[in-house]
Image: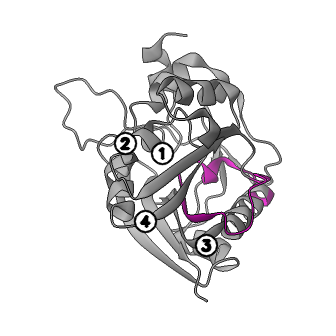
Amino acid sequence: MALKKVIKLLVPPIFLKLRRKKKVKAQTPITIKKKDKITDPNTQNLELYWDPEYAKVLDEWGKDSTWNEIQLLLSTCKGKVLDIACGTGITIEILSKFKNLDLYGFDISELLIEKAIERNIQKHKLKVADATVSNYSENEFDYSYSIGSLEHFTEDGIDKFIEQSAIITKKAAFHMIPVSRSNEDEGWMTTVQSFFNNSEDWWKLKFQAHFSEVFAVPSKWEDDISFGRWFICVHKY
């Protein structure tokens, strides 16, 4: 599949502020077509994560928004940091300028982890794993983050993902997720990928079940049906 076709198709949340033509203004949101809602999702669409063309898309999409934002969130932090669902490792590479951060990552796709290794990210700091059963130790990381991943899990998977993040993170976790423009719980949407497009309050309750304090902060990312939100999840002892 040609890269342009992949870019045209990939229009669920998050993964699409992509390669723009020069005549398009940088902040123009991607127009997406709203698809059917499935009220009881049981499976994820995972096939794309083994597509080499999709890997190229992941190297582009966050340039104008989330990659800048995660740098601001972590620039003054110090310690061991985990990129949950790290994809091709582009965010780890960007954050490597901050010498106080000891960066690790994992992803469910062997292909994407191989791409991360090709970036010269140390192999022993990467692994193939499922975010719902990542098998890291309790409080192993000072900080963790995910960008545009959590919304693609089933509801049971979301709960396990957040629980795992809370267990392995000592201080704070940062999760970037789309929330519905309508501020309604619109449920499980299906475009090329499947994802939840729910309200900020719906997501906040999910995080509050596992973290002492949760703050929602707007992201610059947006599309036709969603706004980006960073959920800053803090452990207080």
For marks 3 and 1, give the CA distance: 27 Å
In the image shown, does 213 or 35 lie closer to the viewer? 213
For marks 4 and 2, give the CA distance: 16 Å
For marks 1 and 4, give the CA distance: 27 Å
Query: In the image, which disc is placed on residue 199?
Result: none
Residue 232 seen from this side = yes
* Residue 17 location, quadrant: top left
Please state the extent of the stretch shown in magenta in the rendering. Answer: 132-156
Callout 2: SS: helix
Q: Quadrant of the C terminus?
A: bottom right
* Residue 220 location, quadrant: bottom left
- The residue mark sitting in front, 3 or 4, is 4
Whether tag 3 and tag 4 are in contact, CB under 8 A, the answer is no
Q: Is residue 145 above or below residue 191?
A: below
Hey, what amino acid is under mark 2?
Ile
In the image shown, does 106 or 214 lie closer to the viewer? 106
Count neighbours of disc 4 (C-alpha within 10 A) and say few if under 14, some if 14 to 19, many if 20 or more. some
Residue drawn at 77 percent across, 55 percent down: 157
For marks 2 and 1, give the CA distance: 18 Å
The image position of residue 221, as x and y in percent, is: 37, 51
Count neighbours of disc 2 (C-alpha within 10 A) and say few if under 14, some if 14 to 19, many if 20 or more. few
Query: Which sits earlier in the primary sequence, circle 1 or circle 4?
Result: 1
Hey, what amino acid is under mark 4?
Lys
Query: Which sits earlier in the primary sequence, circle 4 or circle 2?
Result: 4
Hey, what amino acid is under mark 1?
Ile
Query: In the image, which disc is placed on residue 94?
Result: 2
- What residue would you read off at disc 1? 14
The image position of residue 163, as x and y in percent, is: 73, 67
